[in-house]
């Protein structure tokens, strides 16, 4: 007889440990058909089955994921759980995806990863959105509440921005081509910013905004682009390619519509502030200038007083030297006058000598005279004209 007897608790705990240790039972995806879906206190309870088998499932807080209908084919993501107390096997669900949407989501993920690798979502190349735009182009459908919400939101804060609407299809086959054509046209029109907008919708309805060609068109735009597609929980490739992603069209309008009154108040504040700073600077500069002028005048006075004594000393020395030079030159002049007076021929004439000239030339020898010549004789008090009666040479 086998004596290795264990309790139910031990058995169930061992089974639970085996389930927890098995990696292949955690974070897996299971495909099947929904049966008996019901919600109780926010949690979803149902059975997932295929042609041969079924398993009980629980989706805690099921509002966070897709809520299926009975008979719908889905893909569940979650982990196998063994409830030891009740001895029940269960699949705890993290997310529910319709089968068709699941395949589409997989393709979309692959496209997103490729475009990311190719640099189309690179943050470094994204253009800044102008803080104070003047001309805004909204690429959306005229039909629906989106454009009304954008206009109302902008006009509540700003009546200066020009809003241009480019009507396009935002749903259905080839809608992305319509949007691309519109982008290529408005990108050349000089707008400050372009908003691509549409309201919320199902996964399939938002697929035009996941087209690769639209991503590349947004990437090629010279004008900053804001993507405002769907609700906050919706994220499209258009959002990731745009220069700025707004959670909703209303949020996009809030982002571009600066408050005119706030700007006016800020401008007035800046004017007042600048005026105050300029006046303060002028006052400070004036005080600084007065201080420097006072120091300069004090320096000039000090320099003047310091150099005045030098100037007076130099002036006295110069005066003494000038007097000495004057007296010295006066003595020299008197000496020269005395010599000059001594050699003055007029003084010689005063002694009884005569100055004889002929033809305006001085007669210094008898050889210059002949009998009958007319000569002029000058003495101290006058001149005499005479004729030569006899010439006698005594040498």
Image (tube, grey):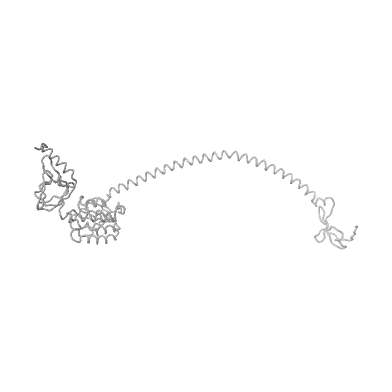
> 149 or 186: which is nearer to us?
186
**Visible in this render: residue 277?**
yes
**Visible in this render: residue 147?**
no
Residue at 72%, 43% in the rendered image: 328
Q: How many labels does the image show?
A: 0
Indicate the quadrant where residue 193 lies.
bottom left
Q: Which quarter of the figure is the C terminus placed in? A: bottom right
> 388 or 207: which is nearer to us?
207
Residue 55 placement (x, y as % from top left): 11, 48
Q: Is the residue 172 above or below the residue 351 in the image?
A: below
Residue 234 placement (x, y as % from top left): 20, 52
Residue 250 placement (x, y as % from top left): 22, 51
Q: Furthest-front residue in view?
A: 1
342 displayed left or right of 149: right
> 1 or 286: which is nearer to us?
1
Residue 152 placement (x, y as % from top left): 21, 52
Q: Is the residue 189 above or below the residue 322 in the image?
A: below
137 displayed left or right of 380: left
Indicate the quadrant where residue 170 lies.
bottom left
Q: Which quarter of the figure is the N terminus placed in? A: top left
């Amino acid at each position: 007889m086998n004596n290795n007897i264990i309790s139910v608790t031990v058995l169930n705990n061992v089974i639970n440990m085996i389930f927890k240790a098995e990696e292949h039972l955690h974070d897996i995806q299971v495909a099947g058909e929904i049966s008996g879906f019901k919600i109780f206190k926010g949690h979803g309870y149902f059975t997932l089955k295929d042609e041969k088998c079924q398993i009980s499932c629980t989706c805690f807080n099921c509002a966070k994921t897709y809520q299926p209908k009975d008979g719908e084919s889905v893909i569940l993501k979650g982990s196998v759980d063994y409830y030891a107390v009740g001895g029940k096997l269960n699949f705890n669900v993290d997310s529910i995806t319709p089968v068709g949407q699941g395949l589409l989501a997989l393709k979309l993920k692959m496209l997103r990863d490729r475009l990311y690798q190719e640099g189309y979502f690179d943050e470094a190349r994204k253009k800044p959105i102008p803080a104070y735009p003047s001309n805004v182009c909204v690429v959306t459908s005229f039909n629906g509440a989106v454009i009304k919400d954008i206009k109302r939101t902008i006009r509540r804060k700003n009546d200066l921005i020009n809003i241009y609407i480019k009507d396009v299809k935002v749903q259905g086959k080839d809608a992305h081509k319509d949007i691309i054509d519109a982008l290529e046209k408005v990108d050349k029109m000089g707008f400050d910013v372009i908003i691509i907008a549409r309201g919320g919708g199902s996964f399939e309805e938002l697929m035009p905004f996941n087209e690769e060609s639209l991503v590349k068109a947004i990437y090629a735009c010279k004008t900053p682009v804001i993507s405002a597609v769907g609700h906050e929980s919706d994220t499209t490739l258009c959002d990731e390619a745009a220069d700025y992603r707004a959670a909703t069209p209303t949020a996009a309008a809030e982002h571009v519509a600066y408050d005119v009154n706030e700007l006016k108040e800020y401008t007035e504040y800046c004017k007042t502030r600048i005026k105050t700073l300029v006046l303060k600077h002028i006052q400070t500069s004036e005080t600084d200038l007065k201080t420097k002028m006072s120091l300069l005048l004090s320096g000039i006075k000090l320099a003047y007083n310091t150099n005045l004594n030098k100037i007076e000393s130099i002036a006295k020395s110069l005066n003494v030297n000038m007097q000495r030079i004057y007296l010295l030159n006066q003595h020299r002049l008197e000496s020269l006058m005395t010599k000059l007076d001594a050699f003055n021929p007029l003084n010689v004439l005063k002694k009884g000598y005569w100055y004889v000239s002929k033809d305006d030339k001085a007669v210094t020898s008898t050889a210059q005279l002949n009998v009958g010549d007319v000569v002029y004789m000058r003495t101290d008090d006058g001149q005499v004209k005479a004729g030569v009666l006899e010439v006698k040479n005594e040498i």
